Amino acid sequence: MKNTLLALCCLIIFSCAQGQITEQVDFTRQDTLRGSITPERSWWDLTYYHLDLSVMPDEKYISGKTSVYYKVLDNSKELQIDLQSPLKITSAIQNGQSLDIRHDGNAHFISLKDKQEIGKVYSVDVFYKGNPKEAVRAPWDGGFSWKKDKNGNHFIATSCQGLGASVWWPNKDHMYDEVDSMLISVTNPKELTNISNGRLRSKKENNDGTVTSHWFVNNPINNYGVNVNIADYVHFSEVYEGEKGPLDLDYFILSYNLEKAQEHFTDAPKMMKAFEHWFGPYPFYEDGFKLVEVPYLGMEHQSSVTYGNQYKKGYLGRDLSGTGWGLKFDFLIIHESGHEWFANNITYKDIADMWIHEGFTNYSENLFLDYYHGKEAASEYVIGTRKGIKNDKPIIGYYNVNKEGSGDMYPKGGNMLHTLRQLIENDEKWRQILRGLNETFYHQTVTTQQIENYISEQSGIDLTAFFNQYLRDIRIPTLEYEIKNGALKFRWTEIVNGFDMPIQVTIDNKEQWLFPKNKWQSIPIKNSTFKIDEDFYIRHKQI
Ligand SMILES: [Zn+2]
């Protein structure tokens, strides 16, 4: 069947006050196959994966299969499965019949023989093998990290956000569709232990010097959240009394780090307490919560958050805010675990909307501080992170081509939400909105529009222009003002259509709201003292 998808070549132009910035972005046919809901994806809905994988560390080689279970939604076509080179699909089998596969780069189109009845569930076994791409700068590039610990033991982990889980296992590699549950079976040398997502269901030694562990994830899980971590692990645990009852917190670390971890991981229950307060119950009680040591910085793998921050406070010992507050907690534990709510519970459908993961999770860092050190400390922290904002590109990326937006989605996203908290001017209402998001979109994949609409509805404020300004434009709203002859003249510049955000200011020692528009307005001022509340992420210019 002829595929009608064409390669995209986009010329993206957006304007700013300094002139026009033009960014030429070329996307390939492969980007479209990877990033869009193709006709070969849309007719079926994932229900379950069984990933069954053998890992041979000495050879840096893997082989296995994914059993893909799906419900038929519409008239069947070819079935698209993704797997990235140099890994190879060796066969695809349904009901004992070997199926033809048409390969198009990293997309593989399977021709099914059986009739696919709408409403029924089928499965196809996709076998594969090879030397997977090795991660060079995990977790930013992704693939397999084949490292050694200080004792010379293998220390192996996978990471794949952005690049896609198809870098190490065959799957439907688009974020819009998630399985309802998943079994991950991993076979590795018996002297090593594999830790994956969810709970260990069983473990069995084989006759050939290997061991197979079966990990069951009893919840929807996104592709990049799935992981394999193989090392000489030791284990300790505790039970956290949470909002939904007792929650297992399990820690898997290298043996020589046990003492350090026992002291350092006290940030984990503290995190759980603060985030359950702000965001609602931990979203995966059935699967427990784990921190798993890995040979790279860390990643938000669902219910098995991976950790490589070297048992230091801050981000590898650094405070990203420059205020000192960032050294009060282990950045990786707080940030990656914050993703359990925003990334794993509420997941973007398209990576263009990645701010839903990183904006809220950046923001969660200051909510953690707020819970333990108060509102002022939290404000100082989030304001401090503004130095990392570049305003180079919009936060929202390009849809349907697997392309995220600017790295500003972290600090600018966090500061946008901090600004929003000021606008809502009611901390309890704001907390209920954050909890409401996690309840309303529980275990779902979403678009930015759904999140924007929900916050507008719940706050009672039309935030259309607000989100357009901060998410889709690079300009920072700028308050121009002049104090002359007993009057304060003011207006917004550098704004999108319809932007009229009020701000809190102090005029003549009195705190009050100011309602600037794009046209000049004027109010009386006596002693010329005028101060703008720093909590609002804006610029100001006296003329
Ligand atoms: Zn993150």
Image (cartoon, rainbow, N blue to C red):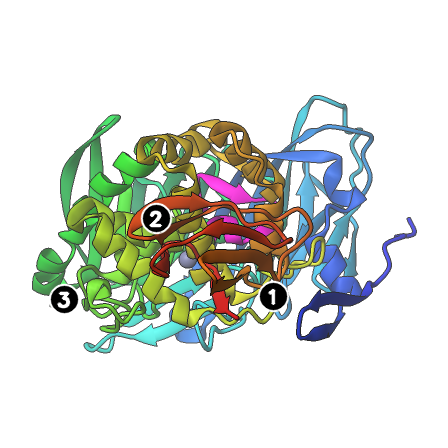
Magenta run includes residue 343: yes
Of 367 and 84, which appears nearest the observer?
367
Q: CA distance from mark 1 to mark 2?
A: 33 Å
* Tag 3–tag 2 contact (CB < 8 Å): no
Q: In terms of sequence position, does the residue under pointer 1 or pointer 2 come before the other?
A: 1
32 on left or right of 310: right
Q: In terms of sequence position, does the residue under pointer 3 or pointer 2 come before the other?
A: 3
Q: Position of residue 66 (x, y in %)?
A: 56, 47
Task: For mark 3, give the secondary structure.
Answer: helix
Residue located 24% across and 78% down the image? 152
Q: Position of residue 5 (x, y in %)?
A: 85, 54
On whether ligand 1 comes within 8 Å of the CB at mark 3, the answer is no
Q: Amino acid at mark 3?
A: Asn
Q: Which mark is residue 250?
A: none
Circle 2 Cα neighbour tier, 10 Å, few/some/many (<14 / 14–19 / ≥20): many
Q: Amino acid at mark 1?
A: Leu
26 on left or right of 247: right
Start and end of the magenta stretch?
A: 342-357
Q: CA distance from mark 1 to mark 3?
A: 34 Å
Res. 77 image quadrant: top right
Q: Is residue 469 above or below residue 319?
A: above
On whether ligand 1 comes within 8 Å of the CB at mark 2, the answer is yes
For label 2, the residue is: 338
Q: Which mark is residue 87?
A: 1
Task: For mark 2, give the secondary structure.
Answer: helix
For label 3, the residue is: 257
Q: Amino acid at mark 2?
A: Gly
Ligand 1 quarter of the rendering: bottom left
Of 491 and 43, which appears nearest the observer?
491
Q: Is residue 290 visible?
A: yes
Q: CA distance from mark 3 to mark 2?
A: 24 Å
